[in-house]
């Protein structure tokens, strides 16, 4: 048995890991790489370490684009096997991949108009909505804690990762050469005590663990701090009559924001202001949340039993139509516009940032991780000017960043999760989905706790298990 690391190796994007088991190839995740536009397109378009047609099975940890976003490209290039995921992940992927294809088509149409006038070569989308339909037809959804026999040698079980709706830690029981190997892949690991979703499940003890390390050397504030910080931001916006522009992942982060704002308004910690969720995907994804209460924690389930909608309240408006989105350009502050994508790399959020970034009264609120070279990261790093949709913009708006809403486990939470595993049985931990500085800090903490063989693989590295 071998594992080859292809994506999310010493970076936080493009999750993809290939298992070789008894002559079969099983791909863990098929994420879209996000970063410099030209580099990202080439990386996503080209599968240089394997042929898509040779992959037998895909196991998907969750629906975020950096884990599932390149599935249609794989199918377009010859993959035709089953895709195993939880039911909620399948339902979210149906929305998110269609939205991703639609955004690609619209963004390229927008950019191509300018390129056509400049007599430059025109771009094509990575994949189309037809490719997405072909992809969704391959999904085989399952439930948490239910065994799935992928073949006579591999048994799959999903455990709740507590990261987004339907997210799973992947556990595989593998028989090879008369031996049984227990293997697990964390996907993205959530945090305990966050609203809406259940805490991450403990998995059985394993021989090998592939673990994310996004915040391997950082520490989050508790979720209760989010309310205090959001209160400060809203009060500042009321005083200055600001627009608050929030890049937000359509799945998970947007619903958490709406839940938090609902609590603040109900408890009268801050005056109500108009809130606009400007993302068709967020609207549809919120409906998927309503359809999967099996993923909710006790507090959210109790809230729903009291006939309250945790994702809807007075002065909250979900926007789908382009005309309504454009009309927000003329909206008066104080108000908040929540729009995808979370890293501000595509979609309507780019237009909202472009329209407000030059106003020193307005606020851009960053509430999640932004990968290197993305527009979101450039704003986090306080660059004085940024490029949006091919045009330069000076950053005059106030950029505020806080991480207490993060759906990724921090260093302490990652370490605690690893410590639930039997260190004598565990032969190796592989750290993925993290920048190298975070991974080195996480590795040092694990070694200090007497874990052995902590690896930080490079892209293309192959390990015998």
Image (cartoon, helix red, strand yellow):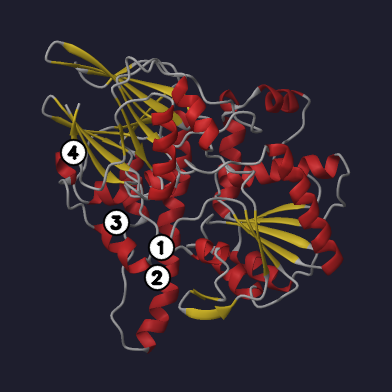
Identify the mark at residue 53; answer none if there is no mark. none
Q: CA distance from mark 1 to mark 4?
A: 33 Å
Q: Residues within 10 Å of mark 2 (few under 14, many from 20)?
A: some
Residue visible at 44% across and 21% down in the picture: 143
* Depth order, front residue of 7/253: 7
Tag 3 residue: 44
Look at the numbered discs 4 and 2 and tell me whether their residues touch, using CB distance below 8 Å.
no
Element type where label 3 sits in the image: helix
Residue 210 placement (x, y as % from top left)? 34, 32
Element type where label 2 sits in the image: helix
In front: mark 1 or mark 4?
A: 4
Tag 4 residue: 462
Q: Earlier in the sequence, mark 3 or mark 1?
A: 3
Residue 83 placement (x, y as % from top left)? 31, 34
Tag 1 residue: 104
Quarter placement of the C terminus = top left
Look at the numbered discs 4 and 3 and tell me whether their residues touch, using CB distance below 8 Å.
no
* Depth order, front residue of 31/313: 31
Q: CA distance from mark 3 to mark 1?
A: 13 Å
Tag 2 residue: 108
Q: Residue furthest front?
A: 448
Q: Residues within 10 Å of mark 1 (few under 14, many from 20)?
A: many
Residue visible at 34% across and 15% down in the picture: 424
Residue visible at 72% across and 69% down in the picture: 362
Q: CA distance from mark 4 to mark 3?
A: 21 Å
* Depth order, front residue of 236/424: 424
Q: Earlier in the sequence, mark 2 or mark 3?
A: 3
């Amino acid at each position: 048995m071998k594992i080859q690391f292809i994506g999310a190796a010493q970076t936080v994007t493009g999750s993809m890991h290939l298992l070789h088991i008894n002559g079969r190839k099983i791909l863990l995740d098929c994420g879209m790489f996000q970063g410099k536009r030209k580099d990202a397109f080439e990386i996503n378009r080209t599968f240089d370490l394997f042929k898509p047609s040779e992959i037998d099975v895909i196991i998907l940890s969750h629906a975020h684009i950096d884990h599932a976003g390149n599935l249609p490209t794989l199918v377009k290039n010859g993959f035709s096997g089953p895709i195993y995921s939880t039911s909620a992940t399948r339902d979210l992927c149906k929305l998110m991949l269609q939205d991703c294809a639609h955004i690609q088509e619209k963004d390229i149409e927008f950019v191509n108009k300018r390129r056509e006038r400049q007599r430059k070569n025109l771009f094509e989308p990575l994949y189309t909505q037809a490719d997405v339909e072909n992809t969704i037809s391959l999904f085989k959804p399952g439930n948490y804690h239910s065994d799935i026999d992928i073949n006579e040698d591999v048994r799959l079980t999903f455990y709740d990762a507590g990261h987004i709706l339907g997210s799973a830690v992947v556990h595989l029981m593998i028989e090879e050469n008369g031996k049984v190997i227990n293997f697990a892949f964390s996907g993205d690991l959530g945090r305990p005590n966050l609203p809406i979703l259940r805490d991450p499940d403990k998995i059985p003890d394993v021989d090998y663990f592939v673990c994310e390390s996004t915040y391997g050397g950082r520490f989050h504030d508790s979720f209760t701090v989010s309310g205090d910080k959001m209160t400060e931001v809203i009060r500042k916006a009321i005083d200055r009559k600001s627009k608050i522009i929030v890049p937000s992942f359509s799945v998970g982060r947007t619903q958490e924001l709406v839940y938090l704002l609902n609590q603040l308004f109900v408890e009268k910690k801050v005056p109500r202001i108009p809130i606009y969720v400007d993302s068709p995907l967020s609207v549809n994804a919120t409906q998927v949340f309503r359809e999967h209460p099996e993923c909710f924690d006790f507090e959210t389930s109790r809230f729903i039993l009291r006939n309250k909608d945790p994702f809807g309240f007075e002065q909250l408006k979900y926007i789908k139509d382009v005309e309504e989105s454009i009309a927000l350009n003329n909206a008066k502050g104080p108000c908040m516009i929540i729009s995808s994508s979370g890293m501000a790399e595509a979609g309507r959020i780019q237009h909202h940032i472009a329209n407000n970034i030059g106003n020193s009264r307005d606020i851009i609120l960053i509430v999640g991780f932004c990968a290197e070279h993305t527009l979101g990261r450039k704003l986090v790093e306080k660059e004085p000017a940024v490029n949006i949709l091919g045009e330069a913009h000076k950053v005059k708006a106030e950029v505020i960043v806080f991480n207490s809403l993060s759906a990724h486990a921090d260093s302490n939470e990652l370490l605690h999760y690893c410590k639930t595993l039997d260190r004598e049985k565990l032969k190796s931990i592989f750290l993925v989905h993290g920048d190298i500085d975070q991974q080195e800090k996480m590795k040092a903490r694990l070694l200090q706790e007497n874990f052995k063989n902590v690896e930080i693989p490079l892209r293309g590295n192959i390990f015998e298990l």
